[in-house]
């Protein structure tokens, strides 16, 4: 069936992902190949000291993204998009969206980027004997309680951004198990919230006399392939105000961007992993067994089908690197030379590979915001060198590329060097890998592991959640998600692999030792510059 017929017969599948800087929609066919796409650019706002996106911006962004998809369908195929076979919604994980009984948001959406929950996260980690990160929903909830915020007693529903959008489209208060595991820990045996921890939390806050228990306000947890409701008439009109989209399409459980990244890179089996590197970065390693103990810098989450995953999440990745590249773009414009950003990135990134493996002693810190893995609640982007360091363009760019994955290396060194976790394949995806071979080689050096990148890596999480929607409606009876991905989607494709260069590995190890010592400079900068 060709793409036109797929669309006309309502057999196309839609995936939408709300990323940090872009909302993206991907339409796929029965072979899981993208046939149309749309997007909407946006940015978070710092309001009263907290990073947020307004409800108005969320909904308007979704509508504009879908309208852009409709426009692409019309331009390519000359038809209107009216029916869909299935829909999937994904978004940046974690954070805090609290609603009252009327469905009104009680405080502005608090995103994963906020690091104001240190007291709550520390107390909950001790209570649960389990690492509870700053950005998890339960940390935000308990911090609001500690801060005596009056809205807490009015909470009727607490969810993530993906859960919110899914609720608006279907009326169902549900969440995929992967995203749910970033609200409060999930029991991988029952594939729902850890009952012991829920009881401990309820007992902890009982003194406040809230009219709810935790289970009352959290979304129902669903694994990949389970029924998560269908597009209502109200939901169809919200997504497509033109009125062309018909209701009725089934939706898969909504997932976080970490889960869709695992799906998009076929990394849901044990001993596989993936690294997403864009505005933020995170690695996801699917474990054969539990870690020997909790680690503050390693989050235990799950795959979309409920397997345990060790996650290292870094708040910062390419934003500061992109800012430096934009300086070179401005310089090129001053010279009157037409700018092709793909060429600018390509030239600078490839030149970085000519630099010294240890960057000639240069150091870069890419902390646009706080970085919990490095122990920093706030960040200040820095470039540091001494008079004797080898300061040239290649080393400068290499240092900034190292910085993009430096914190990721710190966390993964615990997994590979201390816990002796074994992996057969790690796949990279995200903006860092757009320049062929460069980000891949840098990451291979950081993790001392072969890194694969697939041709589909650029499709990202919107494609990943579309695949989960496809799994919902196209899986065979009893077919597992790993089997579906292997046989229906990737068909043995493991991508193009780059092995770590021993000189690069040794150079990165030297860089990270200097980087770790230099964190004192970063801390001083945070204290000195408001």
Image (spheres, rainbow, N blue to C red):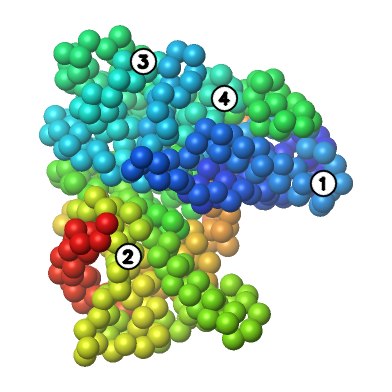
Residue 111 picture location, percent across and down = 39, 40
- Under tag 2, what secondary structure? loop
Residue 46 picture location, percent across and down = 40, 45
C-alpha span from label 1 to label 3: 45 Å
Residue at image mark 1: 74
Q: Which mark identifies residue 168?
A: 4
Q: Is residue 407 left or right of residue 339?
A: left
Q: Single out the mark in the foreground, 1 or 3.
A: 3
User: Which numbered disc flags the more N-terminal residue, 2 or 3?
Assistant: 3
Is any part of residue 427 visible from this angle?
A: no
Residue at image mark 2: 381
User: Which numbered disc flags the more N-terminal residue, 3 or 4?
Assistant: 3
Residue at the image point whose x is 53% and y is 61% from the top: 454
Residue at image mark 3: 154
- Under tag 3, what secondary structure? helix
Q: Residues within 10 Å of mark 2 (few under 14, many from 20)?
A: some
Q: Single out the mark in the foreground, 3 or 4.
A: 3
Q: Residues within 10 Å of mark 4 (few under 14, many from 20)?
A: some
Q: Is residue 301 left or right of residue 261?
A: left
């Amino acid at each position: 069936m060709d793409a036109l017929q797929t669309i006309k017969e309502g057999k196309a599948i839609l995936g939408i992902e709300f990323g940090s800087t872009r909302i993206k929609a991907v339409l796929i066919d029965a072979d899981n190949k993208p046939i149309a796409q749309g997007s909407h650019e946006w940015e978070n706002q710092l309001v009263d000291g907290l990073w947020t996106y307004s409800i108005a911006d969320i909904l308007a962004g979704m509508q504009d993204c879908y309208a852009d998809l409709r426009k692409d369908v019309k331009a390519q195929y000359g038809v209107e998009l009216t029916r869909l076979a299935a829909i999937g919604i994904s978004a940046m994980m974690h954070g805090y969206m609290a609603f009252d009984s009327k469905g009104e948001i009680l405080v502005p959406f608090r995103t994963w980027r906020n690091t104001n929950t240190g007291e709550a996260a520390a107390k909950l980690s001790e209570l649960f004997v389990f690492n509870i990160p700053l950005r998890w929903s339960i940390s935000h909830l308990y911090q609001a309680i500690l801060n005596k915020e009056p809205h807490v007693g009015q909470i009727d529903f607490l969810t993530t951004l993906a859960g919110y959008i899914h609720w608006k489209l279907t009326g169902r208060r549900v969440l995929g198990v992967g995203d749910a595991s970033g609200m409060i820990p999930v029991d991988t045996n029952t594939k729902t919230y850890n009952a012991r921890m829920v009881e401990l939390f309820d007992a902890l806050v009982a003194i406040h006399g809230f009219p709810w228990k935790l289970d009352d306000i959290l979304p129902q947890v669903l694994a990949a392939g389970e029924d998560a409701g269908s597009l209502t008439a109200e939901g169809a009109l919200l997504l497509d105000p033109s009125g062309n989209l018909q209701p009725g399409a089934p939706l898969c459980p909504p997932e976080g961007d970490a889960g869709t990244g695992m799906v998009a890179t076929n990394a849901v089996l044990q001993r596989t992993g993936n690294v997403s590197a864009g505005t933020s970065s995170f690695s996801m390693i699917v474990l054969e067994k539990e870690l020997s103990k909790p680690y503050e810098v390693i989050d235990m989450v799950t795959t979309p089908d409920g397997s345990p995953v060790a996650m290292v999440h870094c708040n910062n990745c390419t934003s500061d690197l992109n800012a430096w590249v934009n300086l070179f773009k401005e310089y090129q414009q001053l010279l009157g030379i037409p700018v092709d950003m793909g060429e600018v990135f390509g030239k600078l990134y490839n030149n970085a590979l000519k630099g010294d493996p240890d960057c000639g002693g240069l150091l870069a810190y890419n902390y646009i915001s706080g970085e919990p893995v490095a122990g920093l609640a706030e960040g200040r982007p820095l470039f540091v060198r001494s008079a004797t360091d080898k300061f040239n363009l290649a080393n400068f760019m290499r240092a900034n590329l190292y910085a993009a994955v430096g914190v990721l290396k710190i966390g993964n060194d615990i997994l590979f060097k201390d816990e002796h976790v074994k992996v057969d394949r790690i796949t990279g995806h995200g903006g860092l890998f757009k320049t062929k071979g460069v980000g891949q080689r840098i990451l291979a050096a950081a993790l001392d592991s072969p890194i694969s990148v697939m041709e589909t890596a650029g499709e990202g999480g919107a494609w990943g959640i579309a695949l989960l929607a496809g799994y919902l409606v196209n899986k065979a009876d009893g077919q597992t998600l790993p089997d579906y991905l292997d046989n229906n989607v990737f068909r043995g494709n493991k991508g193009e692999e780059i092995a770590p260069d021993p000189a690069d590995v040794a150079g990165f190890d030297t860089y990270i030792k200097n980087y770790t010592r230099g964190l004192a400079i970063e801390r001083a900068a945070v204290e000195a510059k408001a």
